[in-house]
Amino acid sequence: MPIPYRDIDDIEELGLAAYLRIVAAGDKSGYAGTLFVINAHGEPIEFTYNRIETPHTFLWRQDDIRRHAMRKLTASILSLCPKTPRLILCLAEEVKSELFCQDIQVSIPVCRLAPAIEVTSYSGDESQDTLKDPEPMNLFWFPNRPGENSIEIRLLQELISRGLLVEPFERAAIGLKEVYGAEGNTSL
Amino acid sequence: MGLSDWWEETHKVEAPHARWFGLFRREIKLKEYSPSRLTIPPIRIATGKSLSLQYKVSISTPNSLSAEWSLTPAMNLFSCGATPFDTQNGSVDLASVLLNKDVSASSKHPVATHIFIDSYKIKPLPTKSEIPLSKRLAYLLQPSTDMLLSKSGPLEWPGTLFEYQMEGIKALTTHNALLLADDMGLGKTIQAVGALRILFLQRHIESCLLIVPASLISQWRKELYHWAPELRISTIKGPASERAWQWRSPAHTYLTSYETFRSDFTDNPQSPPRRHIWDVVILDEAQKIKNKDVEVSRKCKQLRRRRAWALTGTPIENRMDDLVSILEFVTPLKDGDSPLRLTHGQELIDRHKRLQLRRKKSDVFPQLPPKIVSQIVLQLDAQQRESYERAEKEGIIQLQEKGQTARIENVLELIMRLKQICNFCPMSGQSAKVEDIYERLGTLESEGHRALIFSQFIDQEYGARAIVSKLQSLQPLLYTGDLSLSQRDAIIREFKENPEHRVLVLSIRAGGQGLNLQDASYVFHFDRWWNPAVERQAEGRSHRLGQTFPVNVYKYICEGTIEERIDKILQEKQLLFDELVDDVTIDLKAKLTSEELFGLFGLTPP
């Protein structure tokens, strides 16, 4: 009998956050990705995953293959997500700006996260924001940072206050490893 | 386009996925797979009394099977569960899925199928390959215990957990069998509740049976509500007809007393406590089952359980057999297995070391104010002395007259009689102890301190009631075992909330364990109990977390009486046992030999 949270109404009002994780296979044979959806308290709601294999060929620039693969992979994952999250969070080092600025259009804010000490490229279509606590982070929003009192920002603040800004990415990676690493489909 | 309209692929910029090579247009050839989705639907517990699980399966796409269910309270949530299917091409409903439950019925069905499994039959934990992917993911995707315990984690904790408490919670969550033997006052209750909360949240467990002393039921309820407000508790108490539906109420945790549990655990395998395989069984104050031959002890050990936790600050009260009995419980019991039987020896020692988690106040809480134990040696006044000596003399003569027919019970009777006279003179009602305590309490009152007075007796002539009537001007409150549970709760609440009551007089058996009485910093042992461990437990009501003053403990001993002689023997035994079993000591009544008991009166046993 799963336990309903005490302040369940708050959770429902804040909605869901989706963590997009795309990980390259160790042998460069492709990518595995997941959209890990949690509620404002970090409770897992959905875990949608897929993988895609890329060709080993000199005909194409690796960057082009990566971009094409990520687009296809992300589209396939999103195609199976009936729930609409409030926002999508992803790691800037994994998800380049073109994915959501050019290849896939979403009606919800996308936030790419990068540690402040890392050099990160971002598009002119994105707006930059910084976070000082709990650790310095750069946040690249597309299309724009939601308003201060918006539900998306309240959700983000709730996640931050509960230590859930980055931690779910780790859980998502563990889940991917369990799915593909254990079955040997890809050496993540 | 996907299942929803919140996203779409765009073609604002032509992505370089195709290129002309002379006359040929080549595209990047990707090997694509179908995505999979794992749904972990939040479940709302509806009200009502339907006893069935109803499933509603909707098929969205060939690759997406979304199972939704409305859960109505089930009489027996433990006996049935939906078995998810392992799939690469479908979503899996994970509600009520326990990682450590029987998965033998799992299969790779191409469509959603719900298979009821008989969870009564516990099999060895499945290997990783036997556990469906969905279950493994359900486990891995939950927030970690560390994170759940973190102040900034997803769970709101109503108070600060100390480091050692977090370690204790982690130990409980990771051990199927544990004897939590922390010193009194270190928060064993909170640790157990915290561990339960996390295990329920992580969906590792879905049922718990919590057996506690009757006097502590309301305190456990309070702590459960405070520290794990999400959990639904069913308290089993009252007449049998009420208990029947209390056992049937859907709840995470069934809370009951040892006495009620003993009544409701019958020979019928369908009697409520026997009906389930409990995910956790917790015994609070587990020394209640120290005697392996008593009924409640045997019944506790017969409970089928996946986890067994015993909580007690005194795993040995009297002798090693106490520990043996408790450790026999601290082990999971599978269906069809017989309860464990242990004997003295190296195996027992090894097992004890393996299963006991014990932290002392001084180790984990050096900032706790000190406990200062003093003896107050008093002289009986002339009349009380005369009564005492007459009773002793007559008692010894009676014992001598009995000759070979004298029994230990006769000696114990005499000891009790003499102890009573040390409390109050049967002729005049005067008491050297009351006179002393009255004077001390007057000083303490003026300094703003409050006090607890423990006595072995509760009667109007020699015990707690007599003390209360003598100290009326201090508005003392009385807490004894013959009060109802609600009356006892009211007394404790009154003492905590109304500082005008400077004194609480308690019978040591009823009030010596489980209560949190940090408001008082002075403890008086009006008479001496047989067992120093029980005295220490009583002192622990005050000397515990939350105490801000040094705790002063006073033990009354009347000079030249049986109390002095008993104290001497107790001290010797205490030293001996401190060395043997980590500061846990003995029961005088149980440990004194016939020679020692008769020797108290200069007699030799027949």
Image (spheres, coloured by chain):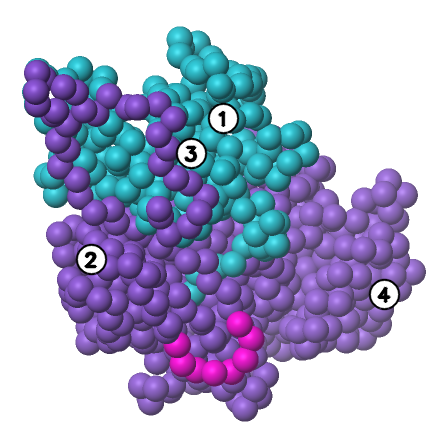
Chain colours: A cyan, B purple
**Residue named by callout 3:** A105
Query: Which chain does the residue under circle 1 lie in?
Result: A
Q: Is residue B138 left or right of residue B524?
A: left
Which portion, as a residue range, is magenta?
B46-54
Residue pictured at 78% horizontal, 58% vertical: B495
Query: Looking at the picture, how far across and down is residue B336, in whole percent?
Result: 19, 76
**Which of the two discs, 4 and 2, labels the residue nearer the N terminus?**
2
Along the line of sight, the residue nearer the viewer: B134 or B287: B134
Label 1 sits on what residue type? Answer: Phe
Residues at marks 4 and 1 touching, judged by CB atoms closer than 8 Å: no
Structural crowding at the residue carrying mark 3, measured as other residues with C-alpha within 10 Å and reported as few (<14), some (14–19) or many (≥20): some
Magenta stretch, main secondary structure, is loop
- Can residue B356 be seen here? no
Residue pictured at 40% horizontal, 12% vertical: A120
Q: Nearer the viewer, mark 3 or mark 1?
A: 3
Residues at marks 4 and 2 touching, judged by CB atoms closer than 8 Å: no
Mark 4 and mark 3 on one chain? no
| Disc 1, SS | strand
